Amino acid sequence: MRLRHFTRLATTLTATGVLALAAPAGAHATAIGTTPVRTFEYSVGGMTMKIPTGCMFTHIIRGSGRRITYQNAGVDCAFVAALSSGFCNWRIDFSYADTNNRTYRTSRGRTHTECKIDPMRNNSPQTLPRYGKACAQLYVNGVRRVTQCHHITK
């Protein structure tokens, strides 16, 4: 079952690489960024949970200019991390900041009480009022654990 998550990550990265190569030069923009999730421990119901090394947080955004047509963020774990119990009490937020790094909008995700090894969230298409950056953040047990951002420019 854990091999499925690794296979999904490899397939996603391969497919997005092919899509990025096939896209017309000036029509649309695709940004894909991945940030490692650092090892951490947290408590759930009196039990200590540990997230070991081997998980990556990926944020994908597609669109043109300030128009976002697709946005997704999620975690993929491999090796020993894929065998852990996963992330409990998690949520993924999307936030948007202007060129002065002032956050003007946050789309807060629902907190999921179940434990999941591969949490993921999509966000609705939208047009941003300003250029700046779009970020995705993973929260576990109310604590922000990792952030991944993309700059939105002309």
Image (cartoon, rainbow, N blue to C red):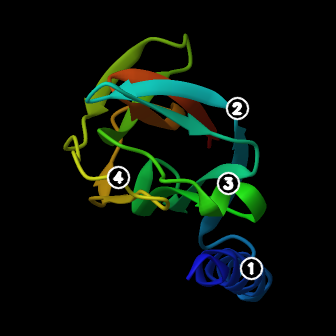
| Amino acid carrying mark 2 in the image | Arg
Amino acid type of the residue that numbered disc 1 sits on in the rendered structure:
Ala
Q: Nearer the viewer, mark 1 or mark 2?
A: 2
Q: Residue at x 76, y 43 (%)?
A: 53
User: Is 17 located above or below residue 32 in the figure?
Assistant: below
Relative image position of residue 20 (x, y in whole percent): 73, 77
Q: Is residue 114 left or right of residue 140?
A: left
What percent of the width, then of the height, locates residue 34? 71, 50
Residue for badge 1: 10
Q: Is 137 positioned to the left or the right of 60 in the image?
A: left
Helix, strand or loop at label 1? It is: helix
Which circle's residue, 4 or 2, is located before the other in the chain?
A: 2
Q: Nearer the viewer, residue 27 or 62?
A: 62
Q: Kindly identify which numbered label has been placed on residue 38.
A: 2
Q: Give how far apart the Cα atoms at labels 3 and 1 are.
A: 16 Å
Q: Is residue 32 above or below residue 93?
A: below
Q: CA distance from mark 1 to mark 2?
A: 21 Å
How far apart are labels 4 and 1 at the CA level? Answer: 23 Å
Q: Quadrant of residue 3 in the image?
A: bottom right
Q: Which mark is residue 81?
A: 3
Count of numbered badges drawn on the protein? 4
